[in-house]
Image (cartoon, helix red, strand yellow):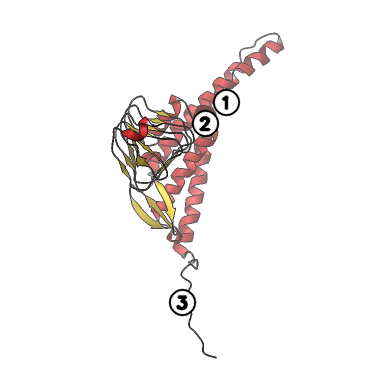
Amino acid sequence: MDTVDLPADTTKHRAWSPAAIARFGWTVTTAFLAISLIFGVSVLPAIAFIEWHTRWGLDPWWLRIIVLAMALLPTYIIFIVVLMATSALTTRLLGWRPPREGDFRITDLPWEICNWGRYMIVSHLVRTFAGPLFGTTPLWVWYMRWNGATIGKQVWVNSLGVTDHCLLELGDDVVIGSDVHLSAHTVERGNVRFAPVRIGPGSTIGVGTHVEIGADIGPSCQVGSLSMVPKFAQLDGPATWVGVPVHRLERSEVGHE
C-alpha cells in the first residue's frame, strides 16, 4: 500500500519559551503586588473614616449603631474614589499600557501583552468594585479620563463593556448606551491586535452595539441599537448608521420607519 505524506498540523500549539514563562511569572507576581498595594491604600481612608465615628462617644448605645450604619455608604464612596484614583495613577507610573497599535502573538507573550494584561487586571478590579454602583455616573467618566482616555465635555458612558480606556478618543457630547461593547483590542488566530477607537463629537452609540478596533466614527453619527461597527470602519457624519455590519441609513429609509 502506498503511503501519503500528510501536511504538518499548522494548528498545533507552540510551547512557551523559557523567556515567555519567566515574563508570565513576573507579570502575575507584579500584578498581584500592585493590586494588593492599591487595595490597601484605598481601604485606609475608609477605615479611618469609620474609626473617627467610633470616637464620637454617643449615648445611648443604639445611637452609636445608627450613626455607624449611616456612615457605611459615605465610607464606600470614599473607598471607591480613592481606588479609582490610585489604580489609574499606579498603571500610569508603572507604564502599564497597551501598545497604541500592533499585532502580537499570544504564545510569544511579549512585554506589550504583559503590560496590557496588567493594565486590564487593575482596570477589572475597579470595574468589579465601582462599576455596579457608579458605572453609569459622571464619576465613571472621570475614572476613564484618569485611566488614560481622551474624553471631551458632557460625555455619558452607560456601559461597563467599554475597555482599553487609554486607546479611546471620545469627542464632546458623545453618548454610549447600555451594554455597548467597545474596545481597542481583539484576538484573531492566536494574535492580539490593537488599534485606537475614535468617536466624534455629538455621536451616539445605541444600546447593545458592538464597536470593533480601529473604528473611526465621525461627528453627529447615530449608530442604531444592536448594530456592529466592523474593524477599521470609517463612518461619516452627520448620518444614521444601522445593521450588522452597519450601513448608512438613507433619507428614504428614514421616511418609511
- How far apart are the alpha carbons under marks 2 and 3? 51 Å
Splitting the image into 4 quarters, where does residue 93 fall?
Answer: top left
Q: Which residue is mark 1?
A: 47
Residue 233 image point, x, y percent: 33, 45
Mark closer to the observer (3, 1): 3
Earlier sequence position, callout 2 versus callout 1: 1
Nearer to the camera, 229 or 245: 245
Q: Name which residue type carries label 2.
A: Ala
Disc 1 crowd rating (10 Å Cα; few below 14, some 14-19, many 20+) is some
Residue type, numbered disc 3 = Pro
Position above or below: 10 against 254: below
Which amino acid is tagged 1? Ile
Residue 127 visible to the viewer = yes
Residue shown at 60% from the left, 21% from the top: 72
Q: Point out residue 71 in the picture as x, y percentages from the top left corner.
A: 59, 18
In this rendered view, identify the residue nearer to me: 195 or 249: 249
The answer to the question of whether label 2 and label 3 lie on touching residues, with beta carbons closer than 8 A, is no
Residue 22 relative to residue 68: left or right: left
| Label 2 – label 1 distance at C-alpha | 18 Å
SS for callout 1: helix
The residue under label 3 is 7
Q: Residues within 10 Å of mark 3 (few under 14, many from 20)?
A: few
Q: Which image quadrant: the N terminus? A: bottom right
Residue lying at 45% horizontally and 56% vertically, measured from the top left: 23
Residue 167 can be seen, yes or no:
no
Q: Decide: marks 2, 1 in contact (CB < 8 A)?
A: no
Where, quadrant-wise, is the C terminus in this rendering? top left
Q: Which mark is residue 130?
A: 2
Give the image location of residue 109, x and y in percent. Answer: 43, 57
Numbered mark located on residue 166 in the image: none
